[in-house]
Image (spheres, rainbow, N blue to C red):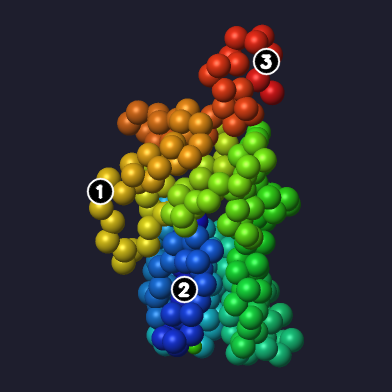
Amino acid sequence: MRVLLVEDDVSLGEGIRTALRRAAYSVDWLHDGASALNAIRDDIERSEIDLVVLDLGLPRMDGIEVIRAARRHGASVPILVLSARERAADRTLGLDVGADDYLGKPFDTHELIARVRALLRRSQGRANPTLRCGALELDPANLALRWQGRNIDLPRREFALLRMLMESPGRVVSRESVQQRLYGWDEDVASNALDVHIHHLRRKLPPALIRTVRGVGYSLDERIAAGQAETSAGDGRAAP
Ligand code: CA
């Protein structure tokens, strides 16, 4: 999951970026409204930004104008406003021009991250906070993964990668899209980094769980996730 953070206050922005990264989101950070609008417009076709966290008092273009223009251009990305303008009339205006949520400053970081999770869930059409696929259970709030009831510790990037695949089990996610959503703009990434993460995941989980579709990308094998490992393939039960 990739979050575009738009905040001109450097120390506040650093705090938010750290909290988002700890929650296994990749973060791109911009400091003014005009650049934010450009980035959101450029992403309309690509859909690589999953959520925007937007301050309102910004240089070069006010946040309210950014939202208005983004929606006018057809951007459907969820937008969470963070603002010191906290009168009811300000919140109403923010929501009515097209923001999806509004949090007043100062705010609690845990609440911000919980709101990010809730917005992402809604944008994916899910109500259940836990992602389940067969015997695989992923809890985004606690960064916890269970396989057949057993806890498995995963570093942040591996967790983010598996979370991405579990959001659309069975569907092939292109390698490019995985890469774009796993790493931010300003991160130096080795060309084989993704292969290394996949390799590590395959050592901790059934190796066939993550299928490589050559030349295309990766998908989560629902049959393997259901616990029907290769050894039980001949027992005659149909995959659910
Ligand atoms: Ca500001």
The answer to whether mark 3 is within 8 Å of ligand 1 is no
Residue 18 disc label: 2
SS for dot 2: helix
Q: Position of residue 170 (x, y in %)?
A: 55, 32
The answer to whether mark 2 is within 8 Å of ligand 1 is no
Reply above or below: 171 against 129.
above
Question: In whole angstroms, how far apart are the C-alphas of marks 3 and 1?
Answer: 39 Å
* Residue drawn at (41%, 73%) of the image: 29
Q: Nearer the N terminus, badge 3 or badge 1? A: 1
Reply above or below: 63 against 232.
below
Question: In whole angstroms, how far apart are the C-alphas of marks 3 and 2?
Answer: 45 Å
Reply above or below: 133 against 143.
above
Q: Amino acid at mark 2?
A: Thr
* Residue drawn at (37%, 33%) of the image: 216
Quarter holding the C terminus is top right
Residue 84 found in image quarter: bottom right
In-front residue for pair 107/233: 233
- In the picture of the structure, the residue carrying the numbered disc 3 is 238
Residue 191 disc label: 1
Reply above or below: 37 against 190.
below
In this picture, residue 113 sits left or right of residue 20: right
SS for dot 1: loop
- Neighbour tally class for label 1: few under 14, some 14-19, many 20 plus, Cα within 10 Å: few
* Circles 3, 2 touching at the beta carbon (< 8 Å): no
Residue 101 found in image quarter: bottom right
* Residue drawn at (62%, 88%) of the image: 106
In this picture, residue 131 sits left or right of residue 16: right
SS for dot 3: loop
Q: Nearer the N terminus, badge 3 or badge 2? A: 2
Q: Position of residue 139 (x, y in %)?
A: 64, 53
Q: Amino acid at mark 1?
A: Ser
